[in-house]
């Protein structure tokens, strides 16, 4: 790296770290696992967290995983807060100790390299993602960041490309191993997010239902007349409040299994909707508990 390039890099790192200042308290003393931490984006993440550590009274522990298949940086860090492990995440592995956050930046993203190693590219993006999710589940991590790619859209016909665009990917093209495996990683994360959210609803609000968010519900006229005037939620947590009220007033509820599929034209933003629902469910639960005491 030339002196000019290094200066630009360090300026970037400082600027990004300053932008994240409001989150410093949440990072104090935490452990962050960065998969692909020796790659281009992984290096940025590692450097930003290292910069943030300079201001924390209790620095983060940063665990860097990388197979070094594409990285030229084979040196161990001399920073005492960084632990480097040479690891192919597509293979089974275990991590000792606590982990609070996972950043999944591991992937063979260089076109010459993923053409040379197409099977390994698929393995990292699918099995590697699955292995990290298993660790996230085992360690009860606070959150996991998955770095996808605009390559999931293939050769898009719309610019800028919205997330609702289903893509135009060639499954036999020279980039297919990267495009398709990145696309495959996203539904794994979406499915797990749905399962985790269901567990959250069961823990906080109501436990007896497999899926409170199924959009198809039938009501007797008696139940509708009693429940709907009492509903206060104007959002995605509406279903949870309805079921809580049904339970409170002794209405029987039957569950019928259905086949679920993700609609490609869905306009739902998974993460913003989930955050709004978590807030609304807490408020609903508190409101019903307070009304019961009156």
Image (cartoon, helix red, strand yellow):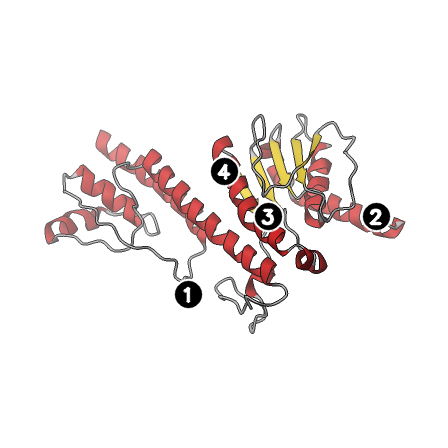
Above-or-below relation of 138 to 169: above
The numbered mark, 3 or 4, whose residue comes first in the sequence reads 3
Residue at 44% over, 45% down: 192
Above-or-below relation of 90 to 234: above
Q: Mark 2 and 4 residues: CB-CB less than 8 Å, in contact?
A: no
The numbered mark, 2 or 4, whose residue comes first in the sequence reads 2
Q: CA distance from mark 2 to mark 4?
A: 37 Å
Q: Secondary structure at mark 2?
A: helix
Residue 90: percent from left, percent from top: 58, 43
Above-or-below relation of 165 to 226: below
Mark 1 crowdedness (10 Å alpha carbons): few <14, some 14-19, many ≥20: few
User: In this figure, which residue is indicated by the disc labeled 4?
Assistant: 134
Q: Which mark is residue 6?
A: 2
Q: CA distance from mark 1 to mark 3?
A: 28 Å
Q: Secondary structure at mark 1?
A: loop
Q: Secondary structure at mark 4?
A: helix
Residue at 52% over, 52% down: 185
Residue at 42% over, 63% down: 264
User: In this figure, which residue is indicated by the disc labeled 3?
Assistant: 124
Residue 34: percent from left, percent from top: 64, 40
Considering depth in this image, is 159 or 36 the residue closer to the camera?
A: 36
Q: Mark 4 and 1 residues: CB-CB less than 8 Å, in contact?
A: no
Q: CA distance from mark 2 to mark 3?
A: 30 Å
Q: Which mark is residue 265?
A: 1
Q: Mark 4 or 1, which is nearer the eye?
A: 4
């Amino acid at each position: 790296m030339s002196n000019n390039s290094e200066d630009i890099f360090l300026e970037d790192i400082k600027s990004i770290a300053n932008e994240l200042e409001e989150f410093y308290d949440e990072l104090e003393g935490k452990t962050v696992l960065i998969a692909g931490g020796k790659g281009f984006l992984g290096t940025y993440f590692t450097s930003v967290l290292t910069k943030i550590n300079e201001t924390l009274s209790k620095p983060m522990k940063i665990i860097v995983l990388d197979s070094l298949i594409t990285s030229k940086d084979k040196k161990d860090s001399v920073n005492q807060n960084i632990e480097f492990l040479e690891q192919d995440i597509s293979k089974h592995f275990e991590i000792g100790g606590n982990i609070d956050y996972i950043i999944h930046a591991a992937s063979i993203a260089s076109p010459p390299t993923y053409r040379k190693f197409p099977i390994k590219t698929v393995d990292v993006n699918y099995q590697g993602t699955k292995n990290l999710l298993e660790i996230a589940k085992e360690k009860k991590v606070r959150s996991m960041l998955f770095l996808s790619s605009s390559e999931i859209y293939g050769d898009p016909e719309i610019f800028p490309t919205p997330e609702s665009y289903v893509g135009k990917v060639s499954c036999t093209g020279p980039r297919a191993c990267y495009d398709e495996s990145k696309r495959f990683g996203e539904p794994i994360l979406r499915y797990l997010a749905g399962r985790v959210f269901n567990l959250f609803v069961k823990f906080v609000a109501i436990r007896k239902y497999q899926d409170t968010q199924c959009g198809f519900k039938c009501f007797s006229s008696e139940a509708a007349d009693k429940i709907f005037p009492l509903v206060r939620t104007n959002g995605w947590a509406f279903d949870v409040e309805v079921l809580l009220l049904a339970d409170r007033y002794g209405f029987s509820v039957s569950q019928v299994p259905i086949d679920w599929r993700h609609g490609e034209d869905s306009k739902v933003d998974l993460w913003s909707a989930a955050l709004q629902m978590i807030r609304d469910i807490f408020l609903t639960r508190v409101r019903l508990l307070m009304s019961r005491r009156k």
